[in-house]
Amino acid sequence: MTADRRAPKRYVVATLGITAAGALWYVLWLATGIGPATVAYLPLPLASAAAAAAVLDLLRRAPLTRPARQFWRLLLVAFGSIGLGFAGLAVAGFRDTSVLPSLPIAAAVLAGIGFLAAMWAMARVPLGITSANERWRQWLDRSIAFLGSGTVLFHFGLAPMITATQQWTTQTITLLGMSFALAAGSITKVAYVRGGPIDRSALRLVASTGLAGAVVALLLVHGGDAGSVPAHAVVMPFAAALGALAVRRQWTPAAARPGRAGTWLPYLAVAAADVPLIAVIPGEPSWPDKVVIAASVLVTGLVTIRQFVAFRENARLLADKRASQERLEHEATHDGLTGLANRALFRRRLGAQLAQGDATVLLVDLDDFKTINDSLGHDVGDDLLIALAEVLRRESVTDGLPVRLGGDEFAVLVTEPTALGETIAQRILDAFTAPLSAHRLLVHASIGIATAPAGTPLDRLLRAADVAMYAAKQRGKGNWVRYHDGMAQPVANHAQLGGELRRALDAGEFTVHYQPVIALHTGRIVGVEALVRWQHPTRGLISPAEFIPAAESTGLIVPLGRWVLRETCRQAARWLAEFGPDALQKMGPNVSARQLHDPDFVADVQAALADSGLPADHLVLELTESAVLRGPQVSRALHQLHALGVRLALDDFGTGESSLSLLRAFPADIIKLDKSFVDGIELDPPGSPAADARQAVARAVMQLALALGLDTIAEGIENADQAHRLTELGYTLGQGYHLARPMPAAAMSDLLAAQHNAVAPA
Ligand code: C2E
Ligand code: CA
Ligand code: CA
């Protein structure tokens, strides 16, 4: 099968052999004058037949695309008709053995059909042009090239034959004219074909067969009747050999070549058209000379249009280039998402300002961005960043340069010498009291302010602003702080923090604090949430918000989480032993996604329960939605835990994207309504439309929980009004600073003891 697909050589050998035989005969004939000259008319029909056979073979056996198949079918018609036509001439030649027998009309018509078929085949070759602009330019180029080369062929080939004293038959002149049109048309076309269904070099070979016509014309013009002998014996069969070679190329087509083809062609054509023009200028012009002059004028006109088109295109390209340069410049100095100045521009401007005098910088950081991004999705996060950028622009544009440094880090460079950083910071924080973005998110930002005198290294100033911002975060959300010497340094970055966490775990610097979960109508403690704390030797108590992300990204969360779990179970069992089995129903440690992925997690939980003696149904694992949605392994672990009797709580409920569908797939027992739906719930008059809107999620979650038979806990209750509204909505359990803050185990023991004693006498 593969051998079958290889291009056969025999057709090339046959056509070249016939051409060589014709040439040999011609030389002998010239030297000896033997035999009838009409033998000269045999090679062309024979070679054409061989070329036609080559095409037929190709069509039969080669895998061709539709356009290629159509092209070669037309060429089959061309070779076949031309071969038949000139076979007619050979037959006529053996009847009338003069050197130039006249071509019978029927034979001429057949040959003419052959040329038309070839022209049609070339005309249909796809150019692969996509834009209208390019099509129009190529059309111009090709017209110029066609006219230019046509003029040359006309002047040196056709015109002398038409005006010659010797009378050439109309058939001969017409066929030659057709071969010229074919040559000019195909060469100007082929110069632009980059590739495609028809092999490029095959196309070039086919196009060059047309040139045989030009050689024939030369022979006829200069040799008269005698010129037709070599024309028929040697030149025309060679065209068929070129055809057979082209077929061979098509068997194994080459890949398309990129690049702009044929740009040189019009210029060559103009030069070519000028040659006959110069030749006709002296003397009185005959009618063919007038054709040449008219053609040259036309070519000049087309070249002018072409230049104009090129000029306009160049002007457009230049404008595009300028615009893209400006865009690049803007992109290099601005943030793509928010359009604010970026870190590079910020550093450049800050550097310039520090070179001249004082400079003041505000670092602005969103307090809850990571949570929002993780739980609500990146689109919501992006919208929020855009809204934040808008606030910064609005509040600082008169006296500062707002900047996005990256992520959720923003800055303002104070540009007005009289402006105060504090004023700008307060304006920005005030703007955050209203909800932001289309999602109406209530967010807080922390702002650090630092000022440095001229000559201070830029990074020292930025570091100071960073320290101040950290202090602002420590102070609580939505604050600004100005830097002063001796401010506590924040822990630098995740990598560094990772190492420190490892050490801290080994050194036993972690503790667990407990925040009570309270029955809203009785005030009784029904459970606790376990929250890890880091008792740092020099920096004091560090919040998990600061180190949990680092622990997660370094993987340290797995041993840390295991420790929290064991500690919680141990503590819970002790409280149950001390205050009775009813003292606490729910002991809730938080579990990260990374832990759920740990293959030993279920075994760890089992071991913690077994070692402490805590009944499994007292343990409530708090999981976030993003942690739960992690594929089959996690899902299997969760079902195993559920089967053990451990209860599962969905933390931060309502902030994720698929809270609802999650509940179907996941064996949850408890939903924790996220603090963001408790925030502000008490602000509108009860029953008003605004209050309804604010309470919509809290209400929906409650209905969902009732429908699915799940318990609920409302998180982050900060005042009595909130607790009251939540009770109205049906919530019975709550957690929050208003009810009780997280506290060390000892304080929790006191609380439980007080509760125990209050209940015991009754
Ligand atoms: P969370 O699970 O949503 O925990 C509730 C957080 O809200 C706690 O912050 C708690 O102190 C705080 N909170 C409670 N009531 C109120 C209130 O009324 N108002 C305000 N503004 N906040 C309140 P904390 O202890 O800083 O923990 C932060 C987060 O760190 C937790 O969010 C939890 O996701 C994570 N976390 C804490 N401990 C652990 C742990 O042992 N393992 C893992 N994986 N994550 C933990
Ligand atoms: Ca939690
Ligand atoms: Ca929570």
Image (tube, helix red, strand yellow):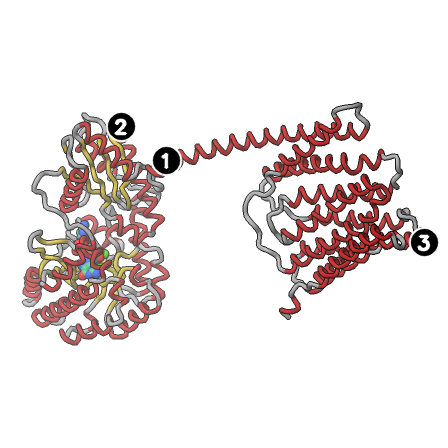
Q: Residues within 10 Å of mark 1 (few under 14, many from 20)?
A: few
> For the residues carrying marks 2 and 1, which lies nearer the camera in this image?
1
Q: Which residue is mark 2?
A: 398
Of labels 3 and 2, earlier in sequence is: 3
> For the residues carrying marks 3 and 2, which lies nearer the camera in this image?
3
Near-viewer residue (491 or 308): 308
Q: Position of residue 653 (x, y in %)?
A: 28, 57
Q: Position of residue 548 (x, y in %)?
A: 20, 57
Give the vertical position of 698 relative to 401 (above or below). below
> For the residues carrying marks 1 and 3, which lies nearer the camera in this image?
3
Tell me the number on the disc at residue 329. 1
Of labels 1 and 3, earlier in sequence is: 3
Give the vertical position of 632 relative to 69 (above or below). below
Q: Position of residue 671 (x, y in %)?
A: 27, 61
Q: Image quadrant of residue 178?
A: top right
Near-viewer residue (533 or 693): 533
- Alpha carbon separation for disc pair 2 and 1: 24 Å
Q: Amino acid at mark 3?
A: Arg
Residue 74 visible? The answer is no
Residue 196 visible? The answer is yes
- Alpha carbon separation for disc pair 1 and 3: 83 Å
Q: Amino acid at mark 1?
A: Glu
Q: Which residue is mark 3?
A: 95
Q: Residues within 10 Å of mark 3 (few under 14, many from 20)?
A: few
Q: Residues within 10 Å of mark 2 (few under 14, many from 20)?
A: few
Quadrant (top left/top right/bottom left/bottom right) for the C terminus: bottom left
Q: Amino acid at mark 2?
A: Thr
Assess whether mark 2 and mark 3 are in contact (beta carbons under 8 angstroms).
no
